[in-house]
Image (cartoon, rainbow, N blue to C red):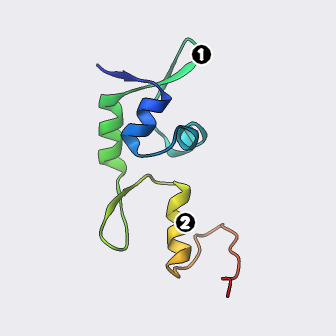
Amino acid sequence: MVILNIQQAAKFLGKTPAALRNGYKRWGVPHFRLGGQIKFTQEALQEWVGKNMVQSAEGEGGDLPGSPTNGRRARRAGAAPQKGKVSTAPRP
């Protein structure tokens, strides 16, 4: 079993440590606490990624569900805003 800290887990997931720190609970990323620090197992992350990969409109996968980048990319591409989200009019 390989135990990862927040920096290692973020690199593994392709996110910044700050994004992972702010989103791991909301995204449902498997974790545990050890000495007051957030820890992850590489095996659990691999399994979680396999179950939660999202296919983008272009056919490329990889964004985490609930990730802020998903909504920004969708709005830039002209897609309808997600339900419950506040949208702003596009800038000229």
Decide which of 55, 4 is in the foreground and name it: 4
Q: Which residue is mark 1?
A: 36
Task: Using a 10 Å C-alpha cutoff, classify the residue at mark 1 as few (fewer than 14 neighbours), some (14 to 19) or many (20 or more).
Answer: few
Specify the farthest residue to the top.
Answer: 35
Question: Which type of secondary structure does the marked residue at label 1 adopt?
Answer: loop
Question: How many neighbours does mark 2 have within 10 angstroms: few (below 14), some (14-19), or many (20 or more)?
Answer: some
* Residue closer to the observer: 53 or 92: 92
- In the rendered image, residue 3, in percent from the top left (x then y), is placed at 37, 21
Q: Position of residue 17 (x, y in %)?
A: 53, 37
Q: Amino acid at mark 1?
A: Gly
**Type of amino acid at the residue the image marks with label 2:** Gly
Which label's residue is closer to the chain start, 2 or 1?
A: 1
Residue beneath the point at 66% across and 66% down: 84
Left or right: residue 34 versus residue 84 is left
Quadrant location of the N terminus in the rendered image: top left
Give me the C-alpha separation between circle 2 and circle 1: 32 Å
Position above or below: 20 against 54? above
Q: Which residue is mark 2?
A: 71
Question: Above or below — where is 26 with respect to 33?
Answer: below
